[in-house]
Image: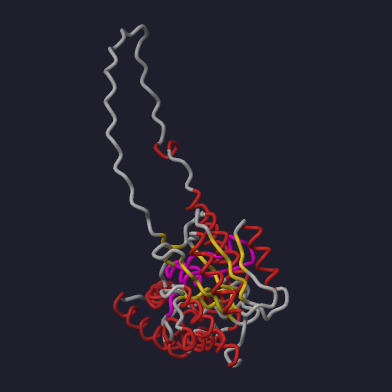
Amino acid sequence: MFSFFKKKSPPTEAQSARPSAAPVPPTPDKAPKQTPTETPLEAHLPANPELTQRQGWLDRLKAGLRKTGSSITTVFTGTRIDEALYEELETALLMADTGVKATEHLLQDLKRRVKDNKATEPAQVKNLLADAITDLLQPLQKPLSVGDHQPTVIMVAGVNGAGKTTSIGKLTKHLADDGLSVLLAAADTFRAAAKEQLAVWADRNTVEIISQQGGDPAAVSFDAVSAGRARGRDVVLVDTAGRLPTQLHLMEELKKIKRVVQKADATAPHEVLLVIDGNTGQNALAQVRAFDDTLGLTGLIVTKLDGTAKGGVLCAIAREKPIPVYFIGVGEKLEDLETFNAREFAQALLS
């Protein structure tokens, strides 16, 4: 598995020196010496499953971003670098929900790079655009830190339909596979079958879950954090109810959950994540603003980037609300959630 979070490493003990083996006396040759056949070094190297998995992920990411990228890359099929090219590129970026501010920034940056590099072919401009997008997205690239607190309490929010509970299940799977003990808090007590859905993920990942029948979300969260501390769990994942930013009474309840969690652990929550649907484009940016104002977000999970023509919204987020994007998803399978990498995303977008 490709690790997609930063885990605090335990101290290691120095290895004791081993005594040297006694030399073996040489034996007389009884046959003519033969020159050994050299084997390429690569033949002795084991296959790297992490690199293989990452490459598979990149292939899925490219396929997922094809709808977004195709409208942008068609701009570079001509033979001239002129104002018409930049105008077409501006339209394509706006259609991809890159946003006005990010589009203006990218165009200015791109023109500077074209001039500095003395580019003469549209294909060169495409590569320079990938560099500009990479630099714009770089502040969003940050690993999720687990292990500085025990338990690390992660509160997860999002609107209905964004894939919040599914993303929690995928994250739980990867955390458990990496040897971390996880406790789930079923604090989404509003949505029908939300607790049952989370329980399925708990069974599938063989982790514990704290839930109450019709219980108060804040009370469930308090019990889960307290249980996580008492049982020595590494991570407590709190699944909150999906809500729209305009549902003010429910947004106030999110504040209550955060306050009550702090009563169980004064340093918690250590991470506050928002799951956003990549299909919603600029609306996702509005969600980021609203939830950040309410909770103080520390990271994002962007889902459903496959099949959308609005993948440029990450550029808008980077320009207007640069909250780290810990993970992105391009499908429903467990392996379809991975760490965000600015260079990989830019190259996949323009592939």
Give, as a single range, the part of the protein colored magenta.
323-351
* Residue at 54% in and 81% down: 257
Relative to 38, 260 lies left or right: right
Residue 80 location, x and y as percent?
A: 43, 80
> What percent of the width, then of the height, locates residue 7?
41, 60
Residue at the image point whose x is 50% and y is 62% from the top = 230
Residue 50, horizontal then vertical, whole percent: 48, 52
Question: Magenta segment: does it hold 91?
Answer: no
Q: Name the spot of residue 327 as percent of width and height, x first.
A: 50, 69
* Residue 208 vertical position relative to residue 114 in the rendered view, above or below: above
Q: Quadrant of residue 171?
A: bottom right
188 in relation to 320, above or below: above
Whether residue 77 can be seen here: no
Colour logic = secondary structure
Q: Nearer the viewer, residue 124 or 112?
A: 112
Q: Is residue 293 visible?
A: yes
- What residue sits 58% from the left and 64% below the top? 170
Q: Residue furthest right?
A: 192
